[in-house]
Amino acid sequence: MTETVESRPPSALVGAGDQPQLFLGGQWVDPHSAETLEVFSPATGERVGSVPLADETDVDTAVTRARAAFDSGIWSATPPAERAAVLNRAADLINERSADITNLVSAEMGATPTDVATLQQLPATGVLQGYAAAATEFPWEEKRIGLFGETLVTREAVGVVGAIIAWNVPLFLLCNKFGPALAAGCSIVLKPAPETPLNANLLAQIFVEAGVPEGVISVVPGGPETGKALVEHPDVDKITFTGSTAAGRAIAARCGENLKRCSLELGGKSAAIVLDDIDLESNIHMLVFSAGLINAGQACVAQTRVLVPRSRHDEIVAAMVETAKSFTPGLPTAEGTMLGPIITAKQRDKVEGYVAKGKAEGATAVLEGTRPDGLDNGFYVTPTIFTGVTNDMTIAREEIFGPVISVIAYDTVDEAIRIANDSDYGLAGSIWTADVARGVEIAKQIRTGTLGINWYAIDPASPFGGYKSSGIGRENGREGLESYLEHKSILMPMGYTSEA
């Protein structure tokens, strides 16, 4: 493997276009693999660029550099306050280069610039700042008095982290992996989704410019085989994965066999419980958006099961349909676009297959999605809203990852709670009511990791993650940082007491 000798100024960020090299350990390196990943816009079908497809040898190079950097202490021994300052600087640089980052992310995954800004950049910089605060405030050492006297409890970085992320919100997901790993003092090797690898190179450079030392960060674009090489590498101490439940199960199995730590943020089939006192006029737009139209429905936290009281069923459904119709599909850069494309033709076909399945199982499509005219080169489908859905139907059980909403009627709140909990998943949810205290009491009875009252969002300072098949572990806040740490107990001699 031959490394480049070209010197690039910090501002010369490589993003869109054909990138012939890999970003390994903070340097541009010629790949071992001869294969490339071609990137196409889901909005137009146009080619956006390409990157090398990292093979097992490339992954080994990245992990070897990450291990050497970690063992050297160049980052792991850096005081937490200094690591926090680097994360804050990275957040500032992302904001400074917002236009370039937004254009690149939009080109890769089809989101509108507004959605990139609000659904990705804002929470991305928020989690970096949140982890910086957590690292500064965290009790890295504490003294405990127990049966045998005094023990010093320390927290240390877990080591080399392998991070694998999905394509649906790549800017946010990257920062939500880099943030805790770097705050903890770990080295990190990131495998972005094959659909959206370009922005990962750009962002990795920003972190290096912010002050992350050489060797600590690498990006290894690729598909399942690249991910497998990363998961199974013996010098990777922890795997953090965001993606499908099926892939998460396979990763957890391999980590279990190798006694490798892992955290998994997986799928969802969340419920929005609409109570009979909802103020429709004030809440209908946010309800429909968070239920199934956020990011064209391509969100693990989408509350695609909308549970409505039978007494107000028709009124609520009518308002949902009219609101969904107002989500105009179009090119990400077109004025007025509110609904972007599905990521690939294959995924759009899958979404349409679920719509057909819902109709075949007896649900009624009061609004049925179509491929909009004039957007034939992209992978678009308009919203579908089903009524007459029962919780045993396929569309109520499986994650669709598209703009499809299932309305389920209930008679009592206890019944709504039972329906909401009757799922293999437990990632998100929401309660819609004029009585916030009542909403909180209902939320406490839902077996899911995060909920919102009259809206939904992921808060950077609070734990995010799922119950059941929605994952293992938590991200964000102190809990997110903790999962990248080892705990060490140092028992003092009998009778020893340190000075206060």
Image (tube, rainbow, N blue to C red):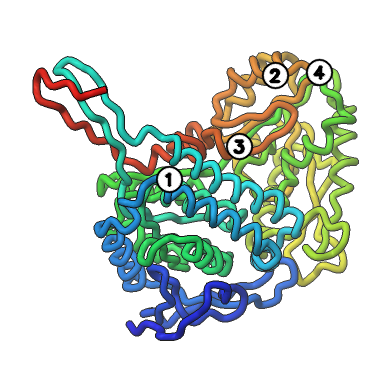
* Residue 248 seen in the current view: no
Closer to the chain start, of discs 1 and 4, is 1
Q: What residue type is labelled 4?
A: Asp
Q: Where is residue 373 in the image (x, y as percent from the top left)?
A: 87, 65
- Judge left or right: residue 134 versus residue 25: right
Point 39% across, 45% down: residue:
80
Q: Which amino acid does label 1 sit on?
A: Ala
- Residue annotated with mark 1: 81
- Residue annotated with mark 4: 276
- Residue annotated with mark 2: 439
Quadrant (top left, top right, bottom left, bottom right) of the N terminus? bottom left
* Residue 381 seen in the current view: yes
- Residue annotated with mark 3: 459
* Pair 1/4: label in front: 1
Closer to the chain start, of discs 2 and 4, is 4
Q: Where 399 falls versus 62 (above or below)?
A: above
- Judge left or right: residue 460 versus residue 305: left
Query: What mark, if any, has residue 318 been given in the picture?
Result: none
